[in-house]
Image: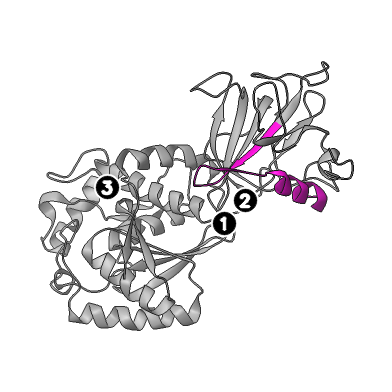
């Protein structure tokens, strides 16, 4: 081993097995092993979202023991193994340098020199499932002084790397049912001529006001047509289609006059939130699905500006949740939900700077019950 290598890694401990080295279990070690006494704080070497916390031998973990996995914004999975104690939970957002656990000797851990087996096995796997050299991530973090104990404390649990993530929430353009004052729900109506003109103008306006990194849309036709209009102007070649962004499934109420059915919707939302509308879904099912989709989108795109193309009830749900301060129990302000929202083919900006980490597990679970894999819509 080059004695001049791993200068920053040695701030965390002794590098006992480098990437590509040999161990008693592997002819090619796909990670880097850093040894230090049990209880040494282990920092995150990249910001991201915790995707798994595994204790002991579970799910064929290959002897990694207690481990934490964090997905960064590029989709890479950073694994911290053999921990004495994980200190994060699945779904939690962590910053670079934030402590994710305590170093230990859980799982199939041993010392190459026969001494204390406490160490960190740090690995990085790409979205394609291939391991890459994790050393640059660790060297950069430890060298920058952002890790715990190196030049001051790293980000605390009160800091959120998604604080600059922006959602441009876009309501689809006008349809025939909009013009007639009828509830759309899941009725798969297209944009009318007016809607197509609106979308063209909106795309030009958004392109001047924002640099949009990602476009994600409901899978209903009117939303997809709106998203395509946006990408024509923002130079995106693909759109992610997400059925979690659909509006409230209003079942037998779809196609009815909005003013006449508004009291019925209020009754379901305020007094019968777990009761499905005949032929449709309950309000809580819609609310959890929609907010779960929003949270999933922001987790996958931290720090980016995301155009989310959805529907009137999606906009109202988000606004009503914001009105209540985005509480952990997902309660909303019913009056805000029932008010008229943004007009067709208009947009509003939402800065995702609320402390909503505690929602992640519940929202993701609710969303996964409904969500199908993302598909991509090409121009």
Residue closer to the observer: 121 or 245: 121
- What's the mark number on residue 353? 1
Is there any visible trace of residue 5 in the rendered image? yes
Q: Quadrant of the C terminus?
A: bottom left
Mark 2 vs 1: CB contact within 8 A: yes
Residue sitting at 58 percent across and 36 percent down? 69
Q: CA distance from mark 3 to mark 2?
A: 31 Å
Does residue 274 belong to the magenta stretch? no
Q: Which residue is mark 2?
A: 160
The segment highlighted magenta reads 121-146
Residue 155 appears in the rendering? no
**Circle count:** 3
Q: Residue at 49% x, 79% y: name it.
A: 209
Query: Do labels 3 and 1 touch, CB within 8 Å?
Result: no
Q: Nearer the viewer, residue 194 or 65?
A: 65
Q: Could you tell me residue 114's position as x and y percent?
A: 82, 16
Expressed as whole percent of the image width and height from the top left, the position of residue 93 reads 58, 45
Q: In x, y percent, where is residue 272?
A: 24, 40
Residue 269 is tagged as 3
Between 371 and 317, which is closer to the camera in this rendering?
371
Where, quadrant-wise, is the N terminus in this rendering? top right
Eyeballing the image, is 143 above or below 124?
Answer: below
**Residue closest to the far front:** 27
Label 3 SS: helix
Q: Quadrant of residue 19?
A: top right
Does 139 appear above or below 182?
A: above
Q: In the picture provided, is 263 more to the left or to the right than 68?
A: left
Residue 138, position as x, y percentages in the image: 74, 45
Left/right of residue 343 with respect to residue 257 in the rendered view: right
């Amino acid at each position: 081993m080059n004695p001049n290598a791993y200068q920053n890694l040695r701030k965390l401990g002794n590098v006992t097995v480098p990437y590509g080295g040999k161990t008693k279990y592997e002819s090619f070690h796909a990670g880097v092993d850093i040894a230090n006494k049990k209880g040494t704080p282990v920092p995150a070497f990249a910001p991201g979202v915790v995707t798994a916390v595994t204790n002991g031998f579970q799910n064929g973990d290959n002897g990694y023991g207690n481990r934490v996995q964090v997905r960064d914004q590029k989709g890479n999975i950073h694994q911290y193994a053999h921990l004495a104690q994980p200190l994060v939970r699945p779904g939690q957002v962590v910053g670079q340098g934030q402590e994710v656990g305590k170093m230990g000797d859980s799982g199939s851990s041993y010392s190459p020199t026969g001494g204390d087996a406490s160490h960190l096995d740090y690995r990085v796997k790409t979205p394609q499932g291939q391991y890459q050299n994790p050393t640059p991530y660790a060297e950069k973090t430890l060298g920058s002084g952002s890790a715990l104990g190196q030049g001051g404390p790293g980000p605390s649990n009160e800091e959120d790397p998604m604080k600059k993530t922006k959602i441009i929430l876009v309501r689809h353009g006008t349809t025939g049912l909009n013009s007639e004052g009828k509830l759309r729900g899941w009725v798969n109506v297209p944009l009318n001529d007016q809607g197509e003109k609106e979308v063209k103008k909106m795309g030009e306006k958004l392109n001047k006001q924002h640099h949009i990194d990602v476009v994600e849309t409901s899978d209903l036709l009117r939303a997809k047509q709106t998203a395509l209009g946006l990408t024509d102007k923002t130079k995106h070649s693909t759109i992610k289609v997400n059925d979690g962004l659909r509006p409230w499934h209003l079942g037998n109420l779809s196609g009815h006059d909005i003013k006449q059915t508004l009291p019925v919707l209020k009754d379901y939302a305020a007094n019968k939130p777990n009761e499905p509308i005949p032929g449709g879904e309950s309000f809580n099912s819609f609310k959890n699905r929609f907010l779960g989709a929003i949270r999933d989108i922001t987790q996958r795109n931290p720090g980016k500006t995301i155009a989310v193309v959805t529907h009137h009830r999606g906009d109202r749900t988000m606004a009503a949740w914001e009105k209540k301060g985005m509480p952990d129990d997902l309660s909303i302000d019913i009056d805000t939900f029932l008010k008229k929202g943004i007009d067709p083919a208009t947009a509003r900006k939402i800065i995702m700077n609320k402390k909503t980490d505690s929602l992640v597990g519940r929202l993701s679970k609710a969303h996964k019950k409904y969500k199908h894999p993302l598909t991509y819509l090409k121009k």
